[in-house]
Every structure is written in C-alpha cells, then in structure tokens.
Amino acid sequence: MMSMKTWGALILALLLVVSEAYSKDLDLAGKAGIFEVRVRINKNPPILGKNQMEIDIGDSGGRVTDASVMVNYYMPPMPRMAPMNYTTKADLKGEKYRVTMDLIMAGPWIIRVLITRDGKRATAKFNIDAQ
Ligand SMILES: [Cu+2]
C-alpha cells in the first residue's frame, strides 16, 4: 500500500508534468560561443504556420543588444521532400530580438540563431518538433 504522503507526492508530480505540458510558451536555452541564448516560442509545441519567437542574448557583461541576429530554420533533409530552409533577420525590440517563423510542415525543425557582433560570429542551435 502506498502511504497518503506518497500519493500526495505522486499527484503533485503529475500536476507539474501536466502544467508543464500546457504551459503557453516553449523556452529553450543554449550557447553560442561566449553568448547565452534563450529562445521563447509563443506556441508549445510549435505549430504549423506562424510562430513568434523572442531571443534573449547575454554575455558576461549582461544583456546584448548591439548584435546583428539572423534566424535560420530548416527541416533535416528527408527523402521525397523539397528542401525547406529559411533565413530571416531578427529585429531588436526593447531588449529582445524578435522574429516570426513560418513552419510549413509538421515534424522536426532545426533552428540556428546566428549572432554577429564586432565582426565575430557565433551560432546557437535548437531542435523543435512542430505539430
Ligand atoms: Cu519534412
């Protein structure tokens, strides 16, 4: 028999899993060279069609707002599928870079955040699964 305490812990864990699954945004964190990159997508999971993405870039000096940021997103090559590979410029609004990603097929996509600052380039890579 499980004790009430065990049941309580299980239910709590389940609630956490459920609330996680239904949380509105998809948050991803990664690194690009010296930069910490956080990506927030307004659909979780990302959807077929337009997804708004916010990118937060930081380094040891704090928030980075003087970089040029491009977002490249593509599907891994699949047999009998035309290549799907798009690159768009992210615009700085406030302290975040923003971009709209138009995902035209459900399935795995790779997102590359390309950061250029002071003539140096760095890339952070993220994987998503559009539904
Ligand atoms: Cu595909």
Image (tube, grey):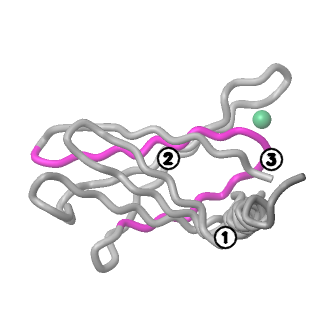
Q: Secondary structure at mark 1?
A: loop
Residue closest to the eye, 94 or 7: 7
Q: Which residue is mark 3?
A: 106
Q: Earlier in the sequence, mark 2 or mark 3?
A: 2
User: Residue flagged by tag 1: what amino acid is it?
Assistant: Ser
Report the front residue among 100 and 23: 23
Is residue 127 visible in the rendered image? The answer is: yes
Tell me if 80 is positioned left or right of 40 in this view: right
- Three-letter code for the amino acid on which mark 2 is drawn: Thr
Q: How dense is the environment of label 2, judged by Cα within 10 Å: few (below 14), some, or many (20 and up)?
A: some
**What label does residue 87 carry, if any?**
2
* The furthest residue to the bottom: 94
x and y, in percent, of residue 41 in the image: 57, 63
Q: Label 3: how many residues lie within 10 Å, few (<14), some (14-19) or many (20+)?
A: some
What's the magenta region?
97-118
Q: Residue at x 67, y 38 (%)?
A: 84
- Mark 1 CB within 8 Å of ligand 1: no
Q: How many marks?
A: 3
Q: Amino acid at mark 3?
A: Ala
Where 107 sits versus 131, above or below? above
Q: Residue 108 is drawn in which quadrant?
A: top right
Quarter of the image for residue 57 reads: bottom left
